[in-house]
Image (cartoon, grey):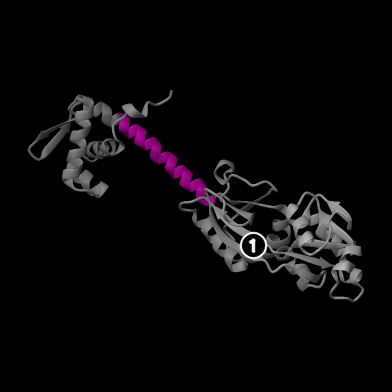
Amino acid sequence: MTLNWRDLPSLSSLRAFAAVAELGGFSQAARTLNVTHAAVAQQVRALESTLETPLVTRDGRGMALTVEGQQLAQALADGFGSIASGVAALRAGGSDRPVRITLTASFATQWLMPRLKDFWDRFPDIALTLHPDARVSDLRRDGMDLGIRYGNGDWPGVTSRFLASARMAVAAAPDLLGGRFSLTIAEMQEMEWILARDWPEQENYLKSLGLNPETVSRTDFTSEELSLAAARQGLGLVVESLALMEDDLEEGRLVLLHDSKDHLPAYFIVTTPGPQRAATRAFVKWLESAA
């Protein structure tokens, strides 16, 4: 059955009357609802006026429910009881539910996974569920607590916080470079390249360096993870977000050849506006400290 919301009295007046009926008086209801006695009485009178039915009989300082008032009180007790049970169940389930995160597979593999042990050492009771997806997820529709997105941070309908630079860089395995730590543009043009397929930002970055993406000798992979794995094996130069190559560069698996130095695009933590669960807030705070 579809409710006709316009026919229902105001929720505040129904709540005031339900409290009066349950607690047996206006003063008791006022204390419980944290309002004045007069405010409760006014809400009940407004409800009676809307329904055109007396609900409470008043005798000096005492009161009693009319037959109609008793009927409505029972219906409201059932209804508010169901609401309270539903809210309690949702809160109980929400407190234990894993924090759901949407992000790209490459960011999860290269940036997040190497850091996650620190999070679980600090917050062993908070469970996480990662949802790697190249598509931009609608957080509300898909039931996500937060996302990590690549871009300029100006998406409508969400709140964005800067997480990490995503500026482009060129790198290669030491064996491929034969002891060199830099290459000229002409030398880069003649080298083998390991590139990710269908990534316009990558193509634009190569052009900005003076390279022609269409004429370089290249092997295209379907994902950034595969490109990086091939680059580590010395199969070619790779273009990638610097943030995703930090560990490879620090541990010497790759050598940095060029860094764009651009501030944007970047990786942003994205949440829906409004309050967040405690577990989500803890994870976001940790993300910012881990960057």
Q: Disc 1 marks which amino acid?
A: Leu
Where in the figure is residue 157, as x and y percent of width and height? 52, 48
* 248 sits to left or right of 63: right
The quarter in which the C terminus is drawn is bottom right
Please name the residue that numbered disc 1 is placed on: 264
Quarter of the figure with residue 167: bottom right
Image quadrant holding the N terminus, namely: top left
The one nearer the camera, 96 or 210, is 210
As drawn, the residue found furthest toward the top would be 1
The answer to whether any part of residue 25 appears in the image is: no
Dominant SS of magenta comes to: helix
Query: Magenta stretch: residue 164 in it?
Result: no
Q: Secondary structure at mark 1?
A: loop
**Residue in the image at 86% along x and 71% along y:** 184
Location of residue 209 in the rendering, given as x and y in whole percent from the top left corner: 79, 64
* Image quadrant assignment for residue 215: bottom right
Q: Along the horizontal axis of the image, is 100 left or right of 37? A: right
Report the magenta residues as a range: 75-96
Residue 272 visible, this angle: yes
| Residue at the farthest left position | 60
- At horizontal 89% and vertical 68% (from top left) the residue drawn is 187
Query: Residue 176, percent across and down?
Result: 91, 68
